[in-house]
Image (cartoon, rainbow, N blue to C red):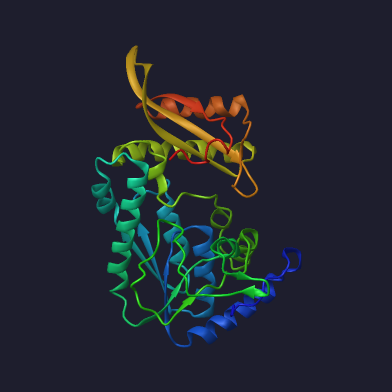
Amino acid sequence: MNIYGARKLENDFDLEAYEKQAICTIKEQVGYGKVLLALSGGVDSSVCAALLAKAIPKRLYCIYVDTGLMRKNESDEVEAVFRGHDLNFVRVCAEKRFLKRLSGVTDPETKRKIIGEEFIRVFEQEAAKIRGVDFLAQGTIYPDVLESGTAGSKGVKGTKIIKSHHNVGGLPEKMSFKGLVEPLRILYKNEVRALGRQLGLPAALTNKQPFPGPGLAVRCIGEVTKERLEILREADFIFRTELDASGERADQYFAVLTDLRTVGVRDGGRAYGYTIALRAVASSDFMTAGYVSLTHELLSRVSERITSELPSVSRVVYDITGKPPATVEWE
């Protein structure tokens, strides 16, 4: 039985009533126990954290694993938001660990596997430092339930399955808890965003676009190194900043650092620099997506900034492939 209520029609959903009901249910389920949450910084886990903090102040423990694979300033922004909430926030700076494991690796699936395994190790080590944790919380939302096949016609059945973590991969199954807390389980994504705003989370967080589980590792084609990640972070920041300021719209937009070097002109001589690819798509469900026809003025401005501010980049291209046949991400 779904302890947070039955799924209602989207246009009839009362978020204020839901928040009150969810808080009461959390208190009833958790009692005086402690709750552990793997906070990825994404919309779902962040809203879950804010709701739990309101329901059980000081008894929520959020572990944020800083893999070093996030976008520019992202980890600092996440910490700034949650340091101010009524919860126990733990940021684990594990960049060196992840980069060491990824050294020399170029295969996309191997990258994903390594990142998932390392995340679990870091999470387990940090969780072991917190004594007396009774419950594990997850930001599971209704589409996740539908995809897992556990939704019943009169609500949602089953709360025992731990779904893949938003940020990297499955959380460790061997960890023992009294129960699983999933207070967003009957909400659609747009409702989760609205609930986040209702709880006072900043728009930069509630409006955050989708981000791949392994982070920038799958937007850094080829080997993942600190140097290459910094190039990608800056190029991505320039693109997202310019697009946001332009007033043009896209549902997901980012830069990719390819493993292709092309000839360019730098300081009066020939130079072989990296090629940056830009990607901007429009989609309602991300099962299919079309590229966004950004203006030449915007693309020209982004290209000029990237190549002038990043000396190691000699060329910028724009991806106009839809999904299908391509995927939104490059790896």
Up the image or down, 114 lies above or below 170; here it is above
Residue at 23 percent of width and 48 percent of height: 100
Check the image and name the residue furthest to the top.
Answer: 268
Up the image or down, 221 lies above or below 101; here it is above
Viewport quadrant of the C terminus: top left
Up the image or down, 8 lies above or below 114; here it is below
Q: Is residue 71 left or right of residue 248?
A: left
Residue 129 rendering spot, x and y as whole percentages: 28, 74
Residue at 35 percent of width and 40 percent of height: 229
Residue 274 picture quarter: top left
Residue at 40 percent of width and 62 percent of height: 170
Residue 280 picture quarter: top right
- Give the total of numbered labels: 0
Check the image and name the residue furthest to the right.
Answer: 12
Viewport quadrant of the N terminus: bottom right
Q: Is residue 183 left or right of residue 249?
A: left
Residue 101 rendering spot, x and y as whole percentages: 25, 49
Residue 118 rendering spot, x and y as whole percentages: 30, 57
Residue 157 showing in the rendered view = yes
Q: Is residue 9 left or right of residue 225?
A: right
Residue 66 rendering spot, x and y as whole percentages: 35, 56
The one nearer the camera, 178 or 261, is 178
The one nearer the camera, 141 or 315, is 141
Residue 67 showing in the rendered view = no
